Amino acid sequence: MQLILAKPRGVCAGVARAVEIVERALERFGTPLYVRREIVHNSYTVQRLREQGVVFVEELHEVPRGATVVFSAHGVSPAVKAEAGARGLHAIDATCPLVTKVHREVLRYADKGCQLILIGHQGHDEVLGTMGHAPGSVTLVQNVQDAKSVNLPAGMLVVLTQTTLSVDDTREIMAALRQRFPHLATPKATDVCFATQNRQDAVKALCDASVDLLLVVGSENSSNSQRLVEVAERRGIEAHLVDNAEDVDTAWLKGKARVGLSAGASSPEVLVEKLVQRLEALGVQSVETLETMREDVVFALPRELREEDVTAR
């Protein structure tokens, strides 16, 4: 049995930045350090940080007044930031810069009086934060059926998207919207983040390489990880999402000659390494990497947590 690793895979620049923000905040401010919601959607990372003294909360009323709290990579609404200020919290924003870009677009278009359509998944932390920037101006569309039936007020229409969507699904939803609303406007650059698209393209390359099984390392609540599974399934390839190596069902491997392996943008490489070791114990005889492109993007940390700024004090 042969194992082919997708590249790029795993942790993206936004996730790496968010996790480093929490780690540096721990060093500087000590424990307990509070984080609103999961810093990233990966159970291994959340548990590792919890063991270091991070307290994850759902809402800010669970955070003692005056404490330090980190906002997750998925972003928050202005109302959440205002609540943090009212409670005297020291808030550190770990929102991915690409999500912040979408927030700015929402505010810019809403200020112009536009009605916005947001393509995304209801209840996802990123969607909640994005819609909260202009709650009276944003309508959520989740799928093609929604696009065909949504009722929108008259006026200029602009469509934005959640950053972790399926590129193919988004294209289909956009086409359905354009059919109904020919003058629909879009930003100059796509909102689906480069890392999400790169990982989906890498999975497509695995499918083209004739793998007969794809395993994706990622947690159930990770939108971009779920999309990788869907990309393979749409191409007729059996695919499964696994949180860790122990989740692999040996029955999946029966009769398989070429197994593909990828990881969602919030999944650390250590989980991939452990899964490779398990697969080798289960019969994998060779491991190779299929690289479709290289990523070298790094996002800057908040000024208060940069080493040079801390040292200067």
Image: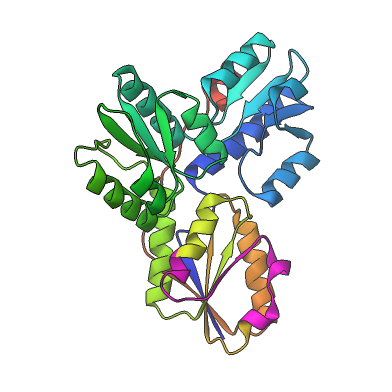
Q: Which residues are magenta?
A: 231-252
Snapshot colouring: rainbow
The image quadrant that residue 54 belongs to is top right
Q: Nearer the viewer, residue 47 or 161?
A: 161
Q: Position of residue 268 (x, y in %)?
A: 61, 53
Q: Going by the image, does 61 lie left or right of 259?
A: right
Q: Going by the image, does 78 lie left or right of 219?
A: left
| Residue 241 lies in the magenta stretch | yes
The number of numbered discs placed on residues in the rendered structure image is 0
Vertical placement of residue 36 versus 146, above or below: above
Q: Going by the image, does 96 lie left or right of 123?
A: left
Please name the residue shown 67% across and 82% down the image.
Answer: 251
Viewer can see residue 287: yes
Please name the residue shown 56% across and 64% down the image.
Answer: 216
Residue located farthest toward the left when viewing the structure as drawn = 183
| Residue 299 lies in the magenta stretch | no
Please name the residue shown 33% across and 28% down the image.
Answer: 115
Residue located farthest toward the bottom when viewing the structure as drawn = 255
Q: Quadrant of the N terminus?
A: bottom right
Q: Position of residue 144 (x, y in %)?
A: 38, 53
Viewer can see residue 264: no
Q: Position of residue 23 (x, y in %)?
A: 67, 35
Q: Nearer the viewer, residue 310 or 181?
A: 181
Q: Going by the image, does 87 lie left or right of 304?
A: right
